[in-house]
Amino acid sequence: MAPDSPPSPAPVLDPAEYAFEGMELLPTPRLVVYERFVAENIDRMRRLLEGVVPGSGFRHLMPHVKTHKSLAVMGLFEKAGIESYKASLNELDLCLEAGARDVFVAYPLLAADAERLAGLAAEHPHARITAQVGRIEHAERLAAAARRKGVEIDCLIDLDVGGRRTGIPPGAAADLARAILGSPRLGALRLKGVHAYDGHNRSAVPEERAACARETMEAVVRAFRDVERAGAAADRVVVAGTPPFLQDLDELVNRHRLDADVKVSPGTWVYWDTGYDRILPGQFRMAALVLTQVIDLPGEDLITLNAGHKRWAIDQGPLEVFSIQGLEFASASEEHTVLRARGPRPPLEARILLAPRHVCPTVNAWESFTWVGRDGRVEAAAEPVSARNR
Ligand SMILES: Cc1ncc(COP(=O)(O)O)c(C=O)c1O
């Protein structure tokens, strides 16, 4: 998510870095994903995690796959040794297809979804599929579906640590744990711990993020201990989006020394976007861009591009970073983006790359993307955004 006030000016994409063989011939508009920068982000991620917990590799990482929804990226994750994933139900198939053995479906499940998850658990007995439970009604639906499919399902209690979106207050975890553990009808559920997504912790000031992480992780640890005391064989805590994942990890592992499988679950880091670059400047590389062309030249200083906000998400504000210097956002409609040129206007046909302000819904706007290999050549002209329509 974007911060409320931009702390730093967004950079310009270096066109030399993002040029690739055949770019001039590619039909536009296109979503373009660069393997080189995805790989670099994976390397950076490992270094960041190891900066907090030396020698831990990817042990504490459970990336949310909602950002990329792609088998190609799952392949890079698996190759790097990433073993655990967070997903919505629509992305669970993608993870299983990629061979993932540990997937947490972090979304409240109604009856039909619970049935689907239990069915997939039955079909994939060697995968650890974990579900989220935010109310006793979720537990009832999940347990009933699990019974029907003849499986047992791990679940985590979803805590509302400030986002006011899903879950219960941390102080209510003990009651929910007792209700789950005490009901014979819910015997197909194995209560394994707690989940807390702290999407509200997104200050651009590191000290503010750290202070918020300290407070929220204290509540998470208390809730985890309450769940243990209620009698659960709890062994897992899953927390965090991209802005506070390092502070959250530090709190849980180094400060509280929590004796549990601690996972942090950022998603956006893998592709990066200008919204997060304002909060964490330069932390990761932009790896997914929209390639457009100039289709018209209205007025004295405007250029019109052949992609509008049906092709890049506008929910967190307009575009602000381009592959040509001196451009700024003027307006957008569904199929057009209009930019103002502060200097000479790029001519008709000129190719311009756009950095998404919010990459997750931008990717979701495309059926497929052009996958540029590490050698700067197109590796796949139409690599599917596999989990998009499921
Ligand atoms: C439950 C949950 N976990 C993890 C994430 C990943 O967060 P981010 O987009 O900050 O990487 C999200 C993002 O919306 C989320 O909803």
Image: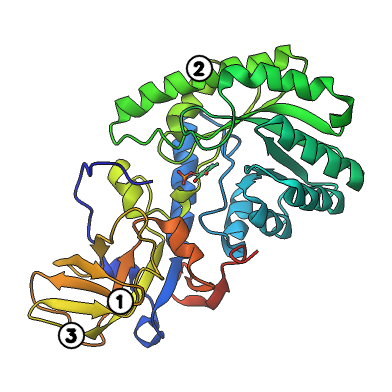
Residue 333 screen position, x and y as percent = 31, 72
Which scheme is used to colour this image of the protein?
rainbow
- In the image, what residue type sits under mark 1? His
Which class describes the residues within 10 Å of circle 3: few (<14), some (14-19), or many (20+)? few
**Which of the 4 image quadrants contains residue 344?**
bottom left
- In the image, what residue type sits under mark 2? Glu
The residue depicted at 91 percent of the width and 45 percent of the height is 148
| Residue of label 1 | 336
Find residue 221 and name its label: none
Question: Is residue 346 shown to the viewer in this render?
Answer: yes
Q: In the figure, is residue 134 to the left or right of 52?
A: right
Q: Nearer the viewer, residue 386 or 45?
A: 386
Q: Nearer the viewer, residue 72 or 388?
A: 388
User: Is residue 42 shown above or below 53?
Assistant: below
Q: Secondary structure at mark 2?
A: helix
The residue depicted at 75 percent of the width and 18 percent of the height is 178
| Residue of label 3 | 347
The residue depicted at 44 percent of the width and 65 percent of the height is 34
| Residue of label 2 | 218
Which class describes the residues within 10 Å of circle 2: few (<14), some (14-19), or many (20+)? some
Q: In the figure, is residue 368 to the left or right of 120?
A: left
CA gap between label 2 and label 3 equals 56 Å
The residue depicted at 32 percent of the width and 26 percent of the height is 208
